[in-house]
Amino acid sequence: MKKLVFASLMALVSISLVLAPALRAQDTGTIQIKDPAEFNAYQNAYTQTDPKAKAAALETFLTTYPQSVVKKAVLDMLLDTYQGLNDQDNMLKTAAADLQVDPTNLRAIFISVYIKKSQCGKNQDAQTCDDAAILAQKGLASQKPAATSDDEWKKLTGAAFPIFHSAIAADDYISKKDFKAAENEYKAELMLYTDDQAKGPGLPDTLLLAQAYSLPGSGQDLIQAIWFYSRVWDYAPPAYKAQIEPKLEYYYKKYHGKLDGLDAVKTQAALTTFPPAGFTITPAPTAAEQIHAMLTDPTTKLPDLALSDKETILAFGSKDDAEKVWAVMKDQQTPVPGVVIEASATVIKVAVTQDAKDAKVPDFIVTLKTPLADKDIPAVGFEYGLSAKGQAELDGTYDSYTQIPAKDAVPASGTTPETPATAQSAQIAVRDGFIQAEKKKAVPAHKPTAAHKPAAAH
């Protein structure tokens, strides 16, 4: 994942989510403190009205009486106090201490997951993401305590469980790079919200779900990505619509070929969080279909096509269409402008198209007519251009081409991240290669100005 587009989404997250709901601890009943000094210390801490003073008094009580019978109640009270102060570092520390006393404390789990999930998104730290997910899994497995009413448990889980699924999704997304698993967790989260709730607290993760569906790999589904981008566009604040719309239009056009019908999708997505059964978008003509239409257009002149267009036809065209273009290219001399991926004295492998440059794979293999001296072998990353522009130019004669089939993604497994799918492409072999050196700009001869004429001879 690109440094996750996640980081750029944090602004949207911050306006759509509020600090974790103040889920209050249950009344644990009457507990008697027998030691008068301990009782007075407890009363002193409990009755403080200033939050900072109360936190300090509670901390002192826990240090002085680490085995007190009211330790759990004091930790719950301290967690409340730090939450009121929005002191997340101490909230996290206190929640961890609370879980040492009561490992099933759903509120302490919730607070811990909420803060760690936020840190995971901001810092992209795999260990923090993993820690949040492990606690979230534990929270989802929680059972209702006997002393907790059904209504209170519903309130607790209604606030906590969506965040738990969100934390697991973030871990899948950032740490494990398992985008398919992230999609499932984001969907599980959004299913716990009503359609109205999904417009607010569920909106940031709706955006991340759209992002996950748009990424290459086994989880890519552009129809789903378009739906969720549309949903976010419908309810995002105006300032964020301008950021979301280009992505929405890009993926819609990539799938459909043009923008007609997008407004209708936006209108439909405003009604429900998830697309209705049978929702679909008409796909654009395939690359092969578009190529055939271009080649059968009487205005198309094959020799005049750009090198990148010719390569696209060789990569995606039908066999007949590719051969038609290759018949024009075969045995013709051509420049090969691109980035060096690998080079030796006899062969230079170059990435010419943008896709090849992005993937750092060669799409042109140039066999040189005369081997290069070691000092003349180009470095990886060197870019050849056109001699007409004064740049070093790599030339050769078209010899053969190979159509490279697309490869499916390899799903993530354990700690192994997913291997992305690769698109269909073409690799072109060029023979009799040679290099035209960069033309050095001539340095103009210095002519003395009138003010600096040589002195006349006497």
Image: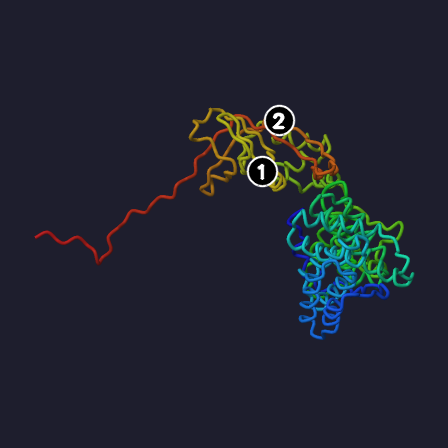
- Give the quadrant of residue 357: top right
Whether residue 52 is situated above or below residue 395 in the rendered picture: below
Q: Nearer the viewer, residue 346 or 85?
A: 85
Q: How many marks?
A: 2
Residue 424 image point, x, y percent: 70, 35
56 horizontally vs 263: left or right: left
* Callout 2 amino acid: Ser
- Give the quadrant of residue 161: bottom right
* Res. 304 in view: no
Tell me whether circle 2 and circle 1 mark residues in contact (CB < 8 Å).
no
* Callout 1 amino acid: Val
- Which residue is denoted by mark 2 in the rendering? 400
Q: What is the number of the mark on residue 352?
A: 1
Q: Secondary structure at mark 2?
A: strand
Sequence-wise, the earlier of marks 2 and 1 is 1
- The residue positioned 60% from the left and 28% from the top of the image is 330
61 horizontally vs 329: left or right: right
Q: Nearer the viewer, mark 2 or mark 1?
A: 1
Q: Secondary structure at mark 1?
A: loop
Residue 25 image point, x, y percent: 81, 63
Q: Residues within 10 Å of mark 1 (few under 14, many from 20)?
A: many
Residue reaching furthest bottom? 49
Residue 293 image point, x, y percent: 73, 41
* Res. 312 in view: yes
- The residue positioned 71% from the left and 35% from the top of the image is 317
Q: Nearer the viewer, residue 57 or 413?
A: 57
Whether residue 285 is situated above or below residue 55 in the rendered picture: above
